[in-house]
Image (cartoon, helix red, strand yellow):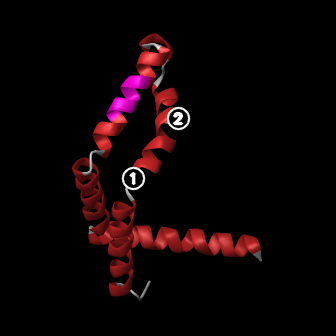
């Protein structure tokens, strides 16, 4: 029963994602997110964090994978709730308009 729910959820996410791509809404959401993150200083904060990590570990001792692993949790945590809520609302509106999914 749990496996079928997981499969059903994954199938629903895939369907929604496909619809977002087909309609061009996914690109619009990505652009909105990019603009909001720049506007709130998120990108600058993450750049600064990357520089700190590289400075601490030394350029020769840091791979791209290391850097991604190090900054991803902080990057996610630094996204303002207002940005998350705005994106979620846009997705809900999209789903309401395309209720036939």
Between circles 1 and 2, the one closer to the viewer is 1
Q: Is residue 35 left or right of residue 20?
A: left
Quadrant where the N terminus sits is bottom right
Q: Is residue 23 above or below residue 79?
A: below
User: Which residue occupies 48% across, 19% down?
Assistant: 62
How packed mark 2 is, by other alpha carbons closer than 10 Å (few <14, some 14-19, many 20 or more), is: few
How packed mark 1 is, by other alpha carbons closer than 10 Å (few <14, some 14-19, many 20 or more), is: some
Secondary structure category for the residue under label 1 = loop
Pick whichever of labels 1 and 2 is earlier in the sequence: 2
Quadrant where the C terminus sits is bottom left
Q: Position of residue 51 (x, y in %)?
A: 37, 24
Q: CA distance from mark 1 to mark 2?
A: 17 Å
Q: Is residue 33 above or below residue 73?
A: below
- Main SS, magenta residues: helix
User: Which residue occupies 39% across, 31% down?
Assistant: 49
Q: Position of residue 74 (x, y in %)?
A: 47, 42
21 drawn magenta: no
Q: Which residues are magenta?
A: 47-52
User: Which residue occupies 37% across, 86% down?
Assistant: 96
Dividing the picture into quarters, in which one does residue 4 lie? bottom right
User: Which residue occupies 28% across, 38% down?
Assistant: 44
Q: Is residue 28 above or below residue 98?
A: above
Q: Which residue is mark 1?
A: 79
Could you tell me if the residues under marks 1 and 2 are in contact, i.e. CB atoms within 8 Å?
Answer: no
Q: Is residue 30 left or right of residue 73?
A: left
Q: Residue 69: which numbered mark, if any?
A: 2
Q: Is residue 76 above or below residue 51?
A: below
Secondary structure category for the residue under label 2 = helix
How many numbered callouts? 2
Front one among 43 and 97: 43
Q: Position of residue 72 (x, y in %)?
A: 48, 41
């Amino acid at each position: 029963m749990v496996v079928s729910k997981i499969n059903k959820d994954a199938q629903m996410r895939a369907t929604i994602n496909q619809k977002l791509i087909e309609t061009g809404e996914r690109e619009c959401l990505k652009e909105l997110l990019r603009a909001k993150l720049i506007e709130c200083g998120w990108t600058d904060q993450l750049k600064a964090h990357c520089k700190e990590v590289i400075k601490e570990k030394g350029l020769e001792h840091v791979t791209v994978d290391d850097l991604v692993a190090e900054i991803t949790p902080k990057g996610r945590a630094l996204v303002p709730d207002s940005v998350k809520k705005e994106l979620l609302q846009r997705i809900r509106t999209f789903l309401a308009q395309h209720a036939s999914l």
